[in-house]
Each structure stands twice: as C-alpha cells, then as structure tokens.
Amino acid sequence: MKKVMCFDVVSAPALAAGLSNGLSAYAINTPKVGPPATLWLRLCDGRTLKVGVDMHGIGGWEEIGTLTFEVVNADDAPEMVSLPLSWSEVRRIQKLVYLSDEYEAECGFMLCTGNGDDLIVVPGADVYTLAIKAPFYWLPFTPENDLAAYVCKDF
C-alpha cells in the first residue's frame, strides 16, 4: 500500500477556494544566503496565508518535502508587496503531486491567472526551503525535484 503525504492544512478544499479568490499581495523571507523558507500571500478575501515546508523521511537518508499552510494574523506577516490587479483573477489552481511506487506526496501548487501569469511553489532543493517561480520573484527556481516529475491534480 502506498504511503500518502498530504499538505499540512486544516482543509484542502478551503485552501483551494481561498487561493481561487485571488491574491492581492505577497512577502518572502529571503535570507542573505540561500533560498527562502516562508512565503506569505494576502488573499483577496483579506486573509493572510503563510506557506512553509515540512520534510518527510521516505527511507534511509531520503526525504521529500510537502508544503504547510497556515492562516495567520496580518500583523504577524512582514510588510507585503502589492500585486497587480490581474492576480485577483485566478483561472486555475492545482496541487503538484510527486508519485513513486512507494508513496504519493502533495508537494506544491500552481496558480494560473486569467492573463497567463503563473505562481508555482514547491519545496526547494535545500531542505526546509521553498522554490518559487513567478513573474514577481527574481531568484533562481531550484525545486527539490524536476518540475516535470510532478503531476498536476485538482484539490
């Protein structure tokens, strides 16, 4: 029987619904060295979502990361950067799942706007870090696994 590792979130359908309402702002904790560990997203409904990474042992020294999601008080987030209005029009939101013979891991998500911009968030190549791909993010995209290794699935 396959081991299934799901997102660390209270309700995946509620998460998908919140993200589907669109984004108005974001913040990223970018350290002086290395990739970020946390992303904050201000949803168009006013909530602030904190995205992080949890690591899971899958045998020996091997690990795989999955995302964690937490709705936080806006005062607990760093200063947010406003996004263009186009980010409030979400066309599609999907989770990115890594499949193997032994396990299935919900690793990340992809949000596509009506004008074709994409936000992709998956665990990074360095443990407990994020790989972020978006027009507003300028650092290199270094995911834990090649992006082609993930399967897109509905929430």
Image: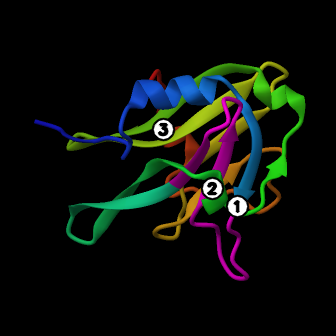
- Determine the secondary structure under disc 1: strand
Q: Is residue 38 magenta?
A: yes
Q: Are marks 1 and 2 in contact (CB under 8 Å)?
A: yes
Which residues are the magenta region?
28-51
Residue position marked by numbered label 3 in the rendering: 150
Residue closest to the eye, 117 or 59 = 117
Q: Quadrant of the C terminus?
A: top left
Work out how far the residue at label 1 is from the one at label 3, CA to CA, in angstroms: 23 Å
Report crowding for label 2: few under 14, some 14 to 19, many 20 or more residues within 10 A (C-alpha): many
Residue position marked by numbered label 1 in the rendering: 28
Q: Amino acid at mark 1?
A: Ile
Q: Position of residue 138 (x, y in %)?
A: 83, 58
Can residue 142 be seen here?
no
On screen, residue 46 above or below 78: above
Q: Amino acid at mark 2?
A: Leu
Work out how far the residue at label 1 is from the one at label 2, CA to CA, in angstroms: 5 Å
Q: Residue at x 57, y 28 (%)?
A: 18
Residue closest to the eye, 98 or 47 = 47
Residue position marked by numbered label 2 in the rendering: 39
